[in-house]
Image (cartoon, rainbow, N blue to C red):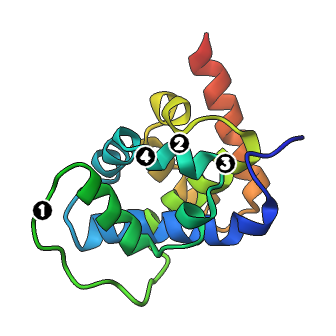
Amino acid sequence: MKHAYSEMYLDDAMRNLGEAVDYASACCSLNPDEFMEMFLKTNLALQFEQGFPKVVSGMSGTELVWEIAWRLGITKEFPEPQTEYDYSMEYWCGWILAYYQWYTGYRFEEILAKMPMREIAELYPALHESPEEKFVEVADRRMRKKAR
């Protein structure tokens, strides 16, 4: 299977998207679906999908949130960067979404249209300690079902 970009960037990409979703939720009071709508409106989502090193690895999750806001013209003061993450449900949702996008090569827009973050969050209790491939199986079934 051809993945979206080099596996060399995958750990950073997963961590950074997890941190971004967690920071947006915990510090900026955005629900994950709202944050992903913002992400999709910028070309950062496309650059992330293609594995641009600056986007997947060159900035922290907090910096990714700030960059998205800046590109959308949001000028409010943002909370201090998080430096420690407790692997919250929101973190896991961003983390596993990055993995799924990399693994399948689907666009974020396509994934989130069929499986919004709230549905990914519903899978957290059953899958957050499972191997990533188990999430891929479940997500693939959902994607196929909604394609009909």
| Residue 99, percent from left and from top | 67, 55
Q: Secondary structure at mark 3?
A: helix
- What is the C-alpha distance between the residues marked 1 and 4? 25 Å
Q: Which residue is mark 1?
A: 75
- What is the C-alpha distance between the residues marked 3 and 4? 13 Å
Give the residue displayed 34% in from the left and 53% down from the top.
Answer: 32
Q: Which residue is mark 2?
A: 46
| Residue 38, percent from left and from top | 31, 46
Give the residue displayed 44% in from the left and 71% down from the top.
Answer: 61
Q: Earlier in the sequence, mark 2 or mark 3?
A: 2
Q: Secondary structure at mark 4?
A: helix
Number of the front mark, 2 or 3: 2
Q: CB of mark 2 within 8 Å of CB of mark 1?
A: no
Q: CB of mark 3 within 8 Å of CB of mark 4?
A: no
Give the residue displayed 24% in from the left and 59% down from the top.
Answer: 70
- What is the C-alpha distance between the residues marked 2 and 3? 15 Å
Going by the numbered disc 4, the residue's amino acid type is Met
Q: Split into 4 quadrants, where in the image is the N terminus?
A: top right
Q: CB of mark 1 within 8 Å of CB of mark 3?
A: no
Q: Which residue is mark 4?
A: 117
Number of the front mark, 3 or 4: 3
Position of residue 67 relative to residue 41, above or below, is below
Number of the front mark, 1 or 3: 1
Q: Secondary structure at mark 1?
A: loop
Q: Which residue is mark 3?
A: 100
Give the residue displayed 60% in from the left and 15% down from the top.
Answer: 147
Categorize mark 3 by other alpha carbons within 10 Å: few (<14), some (14-19), many (20+).
many
- What is the C-alpha distance between the residues marked 1 and 3? 32 Å
